Image (cartoon, grey):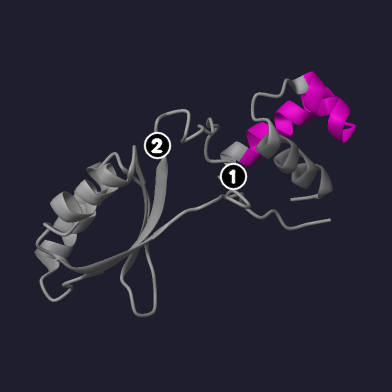
Amino acid sequence: MDRYDTRILLALQEDGRMSWSRLARRINLSASACQRRVEALIERGVIENFTVNLNEKSLGHRVIAFVEVNVDRQCTDLAKDFRRKVLEHPQVQACHMVSGTIDFMLEVVASDLDGFGRFIDGELLSMPAVKDASSSIVLNVVKPKRTMISGD
């Protein structure tokens, strides 16, 4: 990956719908060269897909929280069931298995605190594998997630 690829990735992270001609002007290459480079980045797996970032509040998600979850890992069937349910649950935006004193970190959205409470008490804590959960409510997003791109 060279500096042009890096510049292409940075530009597409800002606006994935950018036209080839606009991208070309921005990084000082021809439109066809930009298109070939983007297609090569896709083929190499650097670009996995193009997506849309949605505004959670506009969708009615007034609460965003991070939930630390400990599960019973002695019973592998229960742990697998936990993962399956998390994958299927629409309120769980992301799930990471982490090292340290907790097993999983979930990013969860809800319409309000009551809805979040119903998710925690009625759904998450009722999963047989879940031993404990602790949550932190997001007060403000200071810097949204963005993949780091190395290079000059």
Q: Secondary structure at mark 1?
A: loop
Q: Among all residues in the image, which is located at the extreme right?
A: 28
The residue at which mark 2 appears reads as: 61
Q: Position of residue 13 (x, y in %)?
A: 66, 39
- Which residues are drawn in magenta? 21-41
Left or right of 28, for residue 37: left
Q: Residue at x 11, y 63 (%)?
A: 78
- Relative to 96, does residue 57 appear above or below in the rendering? above
Q: Position of residue 134 (x, y in %)?
A: 30, 66
Point out the image quarter for the C terminus.
Answer: bottom right
Marks 2 and 1, the one that precedes in the sequence: 1
Q: Nearer the viewer, residue 59 or 151?
A: 59
Q: Residue at x 14, y 56 (%)?
A: 81
Q: Among all residues in the image, which is located at the extreme bottom?
A: 101
- Relative to 123, does residue 27 appear above or below in the rendering? above
Crowdedness near tag 1: few (<14), some (14–19) or many (≥20) residues, C-alpha within 10 Å: few
Corner quadrant of residue 110:
top left
Is residue 62 covered in magenta?
Answer: no
Q: Nearer the viewer, residue 48 or 83?
A: 83
Q: Nearer the viewer, residue 126 or 80?
A: 126
Corner quadrant of residue 74:
bottom left
- Circle 2 or circle 1, nearest the eye: 2
Q: Nearer the viewer, residue 130 or 1?
A: 130
Task: Tell me the kind of residue under disc 2.
Answer: His
Q: Residue at x 80, y 22 (%)?
A: 22
